[in-house]
Image: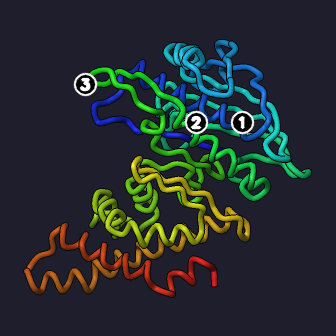
């Protein structure tokens, strides 16, 4: 599956504009599939409550690029229903697939419908086969059709940069490129998969999104000391060594001016295992840094000052993570040596 999440501006998107952004994000994925593979749009369905409760069948024009008419067509249905499903049929590499792209009227629809464990605005699911083997997720296709999945990720990011939307926010009407409104696009192994199994195709702001994933993987008793904001600061301060580490295991496309990153696992042993080993090693490094910052470093600060404040702990955590990232042991664990 591929799930996509909107980055909401601090001023907030108005409901109608929010639905337009959701529609554009789902259509961008459909367009990327058509360009990376050979797909035809079969039909579109609007539904209430869950995707199998179809209320309306209609057609939507999925061309080489997302167009305003298609956005309007889908957004109008989202205003009356819980979601819209765009159905595609075709090939991605050697894989013959039927793909359903669900676009939700609200981020909590997939949670309330029991589809996902976390909120999302778009979810794409494939069904089919490649080389005689069944295909049930895009995550699986990274191993079976690596070049095709790499092309899909690149086409999706390209389309995020092609589309511009005029949206209403709490402070007035603004024009945003779709990349500015897309926070997370990642592919998961299954609906209830742990976050470590999600391969990030697009993260923005990248430090915040990566910290969010790592925060979920660290022990609760350790992560509470820094909190999400503290871990974001630690990731930002260790950006260079962290990116060097990621480059060992991923094809990294860092867009500094956009504060965004795209990660595609390198085609090794196979790609999904490369990803899992890299994330597991990174999560262990963060947890180890947290233990040391909360142990000897915290005890030293208490002896010197008589107390431990948040800033002192976060600074210690930053230094300990830098040490972990530079260690030979950490690199060996990540490589599986």
- Position of 84 relative to 76 (above/below): below
- Position of 180 relative to 310 (above/below): above
**Disc 1 or disc 3, which is closer to the eye?**
1
Q: How is the image coloured?
A: rainbow
x and y percent of residue 205 in the render?
40, 49
- Position of 38 relative to 302 (above/below): above
Q: Are marks 1 and 2 in contact (CB under 8 Å)?
A: yes
Q: Quadrant of residue 218?
A: bottom left
- Position of 244 relative to 16 (above/below): below
**Disc 3 or disc 2, which is closer to the eye?**
2
Q: Which residue is mark 1?
A: 35
x and y percent of residue 102 in the render?
62, 30
Mark 3, residues whose alpha carbon is within 10 Å: few (<14), some, or many (≥20)? few
Disc 3 is placed on an element classified as loop
Q: Is residue 267 left or right of residue 129?
A: left
Please give the name of the residue rendered at 47% of the width and 38% of the height, measured from the top-left corner.
179
Please give the name of the residue rendered at 8% of the width and 80% of the height, measured from the top-left corner.
306
Disc 2 is placed on an element classified as helix
Q: Quadrant of the N terminus?
A: top right
x and y percent of residue 276 in the render?
61, 66
Q: Is residue 167 left or right of residue 101?
A: left
Q: Which residue is mark 3?
A: 171
Label located before the other in sequence (1 or 3): 1
Q: Nearer the viewer, residue 25 or 285?
A: 25
Q: Quadrant of residue 292?
A: bottom left
Q: Quadrant of the C terminus?
A: bottom right
Label located before the other in sequence (3 or 2): 2
Please give the name of the residue rendered at 49% of the width and 53% of the height, measured from the top-left corner.
261
Q: Which residue is mark 2?
A: 159
x and y percent of residue 134 in the render?
84, 48
């Amino acid at each position: 599956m591929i799930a996509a999440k909107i980055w909401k501006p601090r001023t907030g998107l108005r409901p109608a504009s929010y639905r337009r952004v959701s529609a554009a994000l789902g259509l961008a994925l459909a367009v990327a599939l058509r360009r990376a593979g050979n797909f035809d749009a079969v039909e579109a369905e609007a539904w209430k409550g869950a995707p199998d409760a179809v209320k309306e069948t209609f057609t939507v024009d999925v061309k080489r690029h997302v167009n305003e008419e298609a956005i309007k067509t889908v957004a109008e249905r989202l205003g009356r229903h819980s979601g819209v499903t765009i159905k595609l049929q075709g090939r991605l590499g050697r894989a013959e697939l039927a793909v359903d792209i669900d676009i939700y009227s609200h981020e909590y629809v997939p949670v309330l419908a029991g589809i996902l464990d976390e909120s999302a605005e778009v979810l794409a699911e494939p069904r089919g086969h490649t080389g005689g083997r069944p295909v049930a997720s895009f995550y699986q296709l990274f191993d079976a059709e690596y070049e095709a999945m790499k092309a899909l990720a690149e086409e999706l990011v390209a389309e995020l940069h092609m589309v511009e939307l005029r949206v209403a926010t709490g402070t007035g009407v603004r024009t945003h490129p779709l990349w500015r409104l897309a926070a997370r696009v990642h592919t998961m192994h299954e609906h209830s998969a742990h976050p470590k199994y999600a391969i990030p195709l697009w993260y923005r702001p990248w430090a915040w999104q990566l910290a969010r994933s790592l925060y979920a993987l660290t022990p609760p008793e350790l992560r509470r000391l820094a909190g999400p904001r503290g871990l974001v600061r630690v990731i930002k301060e260790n950006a260079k060594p962290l990116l060097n580490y990621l480059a060992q295991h991923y094809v990294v496309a860092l867009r500094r001016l956009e504060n965004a990153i795209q990660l595609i696992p390198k085609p090794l042993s196979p790609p999904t295992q490369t990803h899992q080993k890299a994330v597991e090693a990174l999560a262990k490094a963060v947890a180890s840094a947290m233990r040391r910052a909360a142990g000897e470093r915290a005890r030293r600060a208490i002896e010197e000052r008589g107390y431990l404040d948040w800033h002192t702990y976060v600074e210690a955590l930053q230094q300990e993570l830098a040490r972990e990232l530079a260690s030979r042991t950490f690199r060996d664990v990540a490589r599986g040596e």
